[in-house]
Amino acid sequence: MAKFDGKYFTGPMGAVIFKKVNNKQIVCARLAPGTMKQSEATKKACDTFGMVSSFSAALRHSFAADLMDLQDTNMSGRLVKQVSPILVGARDPQTRAFYFEQDSFDALTDFEFNTNSPVTKWLGTKPDMVYEKGKLSIVFPDIDLRRLQFAKSSTSCQMTVAVTLIRLKDGMRTRAPLTQELRFYNDGVDLLSHKRFEFDVPDGCLCVASLFLKYYGNHLLRNTKKVSPAYICGATITNGRYIEKQTYKWQELRVKFK
């Protein structure tokens, strides 16, 4: 049903649709459901975009507990834009099959969940992600006298590194990410140099590692929509083929990349 705002109509009414474009009233024909034809290329593009959307949503949800709903308002759309060229580039245009390399998801590295508080600004440096023989490590370089910044009214900071495991072909992800934490205090003592997080990860999985900074003062969380640093440290696909183990609890990704 069309609506009138006192000057313009907007929305559908009968066989027409009212629009406001550049402060002008536009009226165009309304297509009947099922009459719009799509080319084969358009259908394929829509199919891939649907997979991009589902994958991006699953990735967001996997880190929801650490994001605490303090991401910036455009984060979801920005993540979709980051994921889209990765999946489009990995899909064969003829067979529609996906082919991933170890570094296929490198473009996710440095993705900020909250652009109002970039992690590099609060850390002053970035850790390296290293994968070798079933071990995934997040390691801070040897930088003297370099420590993280603290939010206003905070006395401590909990740094959390979370790793989500995704079985792309099976369409499964870990129900909760693997996590490790370090606590820093605003006393000028704790340095970032040589700090290290290390995870045992299985073969044949996409590992997406993210880092979160949670500030506390008087035992209260001090993070806000303006100050809640969180970003993706890196993403890599581990060697080999996944072999079922009881170590991890999985849930459906709602999309499979075969």
Image: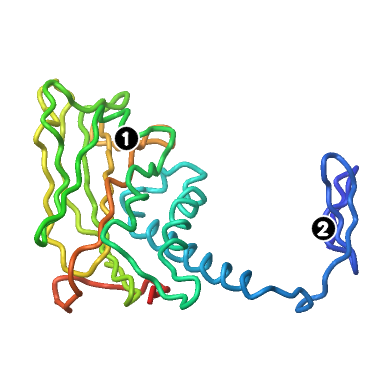
| Left or right: 21, with 63 as reference point | right
- Image quadrant assignment for residue 187: top left
Q: Answer few, some or many: residues within 10 Å of disc 2's Cα (few below 14, many 20 plus, some between 14 and 19).
A: some
Residue drawn at point x = 25 percent, y = 64 percent: 165
- Image quadrant assignment for residue 99: bottom left
Q: Position of residue 110 (x, y in %)?
A: 34, 42
Mark with earlier residue (2, 1)? 2
Mark number displayed over residue 200:
none
Above or below 189: residue 245: below
Residue drawn at point x = 85 percent, y = 58 percent: 2
Helix, strand or loop at mark 2: strand
Which quarter of the rendering shows the C terminus? bottom left
Q: CA distance from mark 2 to mark 1?
A: 42 Å
Toward the front, the furthest residue is: 94
Residue drawn at point x = 33 percent, y = 70 percent: 168
Q: Disc 2 marks which amino acid?
A: Gly
Q: Position of residue 138 (x, y in %)?
A: 17, 46
Figure label count: 2
Between residue 222 and residue 2, name the one nearer to us.
2
Above or below 25: residue 104: below
Q: Disc 1 marks which amino acid?
A: Val
Q: Answer few, some or many: residues within 10 Å of disc 1's Cα (few below 14, many 20 plus, some between 14 and 19).
A: many
Q: Please name the residue that numbered disc 1 is placed on.
A: 119
Mark number displayed over residue 11:
2
| Left or right: 104, with 51 as reference point | left
Between residue 222 and residue 255, name the one nearer to us.
255
Helix, strand or loop at mark 1: helix
Residue drawn at point x = 15 percent, y = 29 percent: 185
Asked whether the residues under the numbered discs 2 and 1 touch, taking CB atoms below 8 Å apart as contact, a structural biologist would say no
Between residue 29 and residue 92, name the one nearer to us.
92
Q: Position of residue 31 (x, y in %)?
A: 82, 70
